[in-house]
């Protein structure tokens, strides 16, 4: 079992009620490095770096944190459409090689301001099919050489990504993926390494896991069995009463801003 933290990756302070201010270094590399080193020092494997247009680039931040830590693994969130598969496969393989195999990848398909970075190629309704192609091709580029692929959304010809991730042709960065819709679950069942869930009631999670296990058979999954991860936001106070009071206040505050 692996434990990962979360490092807010936004320009403005106040992510989900966080009270760290600019005068305390919010948004600086030193502040993010302190968080990464704190996680590393307490035995956490790494941390998620969230993505979205108008936020600092996750890959640049992930590379910087990998260079400033020893065992910390940046879970770098990326969007198909922002990257071409071959470009991303090469960049991630290089960083994974230079960091000694410490890159993790979170594929994000949720809606974003796509037009702001020139992504006009895919109707939002087809974004999960594009994601499936993206992950499929990236995985092939990490584990094969002279790859030729022509799909509906992406194509490469005689493409090789070197060096191999971590220097080994039979391994690659773990591919995380989240999504609860039927198209998203088919992507996870076919191509992801880890399906991420929010902190939902356990009964609902059990049903989703069972459904995904069946989908693995339906889509004829070619990889090792899908694993599962749970994304939980924690709030620690001296007493349970204080924690619940602060949690409810923060949820109410976020609801007002939504």
Image (cartoon, rainbow, N blue to C red):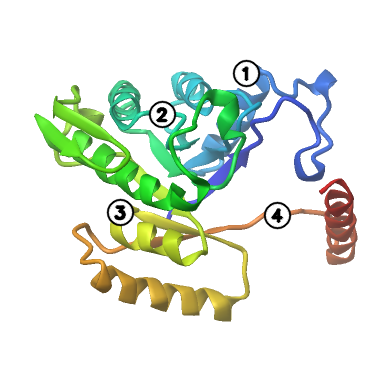
How many numbered discs, if any? Answer: 4
Q: Earlier in the sequence, mark 4 or mark 2?
A: 2
Q: Secondary structure at mark 4?
A: loop
Q: Do tag 3 and tag 2 residues touch (Cβ < 8 Å)? A: no
Horizontal side of residue 140 vs 114, given as left or right: left
**Gap between marks 3 and 1, in whole Å?**
33 Å
Residue of label 2: 83
Whether the residues at callouts 4 and 3 have beta carbons within 8 Å, the answer is no
| Residue drawn at (66%, 35%) of the image | 8
> How much space separates mark 1 and mark 4, taking CA atoms?
23 Å
Residue at image position (51%, 44%) is 44
Relative to 33, is 21 on the left or the right?
right
State how far apart marks 2 and 1 are (Cα): 23 Å
| 36 vs 41, nearest the viewer | 36
Mark 4 closeness class: few <14, some 14–19, many ≥20 residues within 10 Å:
few
Q: First in sequence: mark 3 or mark 1?
A: 1
Nearer the observer: mark 4 or 3; the answer is 3
Mark nearer the N terminus (1 vs 4): 1
Q: Residue at x 68, y 23 (%)?
A: 31
- Is 57 left or right of 234, judged from the image as shown? left
Where in the figure is residue 241, as x and y percent of width and height?
89, 65
Mark 1 highlights which residue? 29
**Where is residue 111 drawn, in percent x and y?**
58, 45
Residue 234's mark? 4
Secondary element under disc 1, as helix, strand or loop, is: helix
Residue 85 vertical position relative to residue 193 in the rendered view, above or below: above
Q: Name the residue carrying label 3.
A: 191
- The disc placed on residue 245 is none
């Amino acid at each position: 079992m692996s434990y990962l933290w979360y490092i807010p990756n936004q320009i403005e302070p106040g992510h989900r009620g966080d009270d760290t201010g600019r005068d305390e270094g919010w948004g600086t590399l030193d502040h993010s490095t302190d968080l990464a080193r704190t996680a590393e020092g307490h035995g956490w494997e790494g941390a998620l770096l969230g993505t979205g247009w108008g936020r600092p680039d996750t890959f640049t931040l992930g590379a910087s944190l990998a260079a400033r830590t020893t065992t910390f693994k940046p879970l770098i969130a990326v969007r198909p459409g922002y990257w071409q598969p071959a470009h991303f496969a090469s960049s991630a393989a290089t960083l994974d090689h230079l960091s000694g195999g410490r890159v993790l990848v979170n594929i994000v398909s949720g809606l974003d301001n796509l037009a702001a970075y020139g992504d006009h190629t895919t109707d939002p309704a087809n974004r999960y099919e594009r994601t499936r192609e993206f992950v499929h091709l990236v995985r092939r580029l990490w584990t094969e050489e002279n790859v030729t692929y022509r799909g509906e959304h992406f194509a490469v010809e005689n493409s090789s990504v070197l060096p191999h991730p971590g220097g080994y042709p039979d391994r690659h960065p773990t591919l995380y993926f989240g999504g609860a819709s039927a198209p998203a679950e088919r992507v996870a069942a076919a191509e992801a390494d880890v399906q991420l869930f929010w902190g939902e009631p356990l009964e609902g999670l059990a049903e989703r896991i069972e459904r995904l296990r069946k989908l693995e058979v339906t889509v004829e999954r070619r990889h090792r069995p899908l694993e599962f991860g749970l994304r939980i936001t924690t709030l620690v106070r001296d007493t349970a009463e204080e924690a619940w009071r602060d949690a409810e206040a923060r949820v109410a505050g976020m609801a007002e801003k939504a």
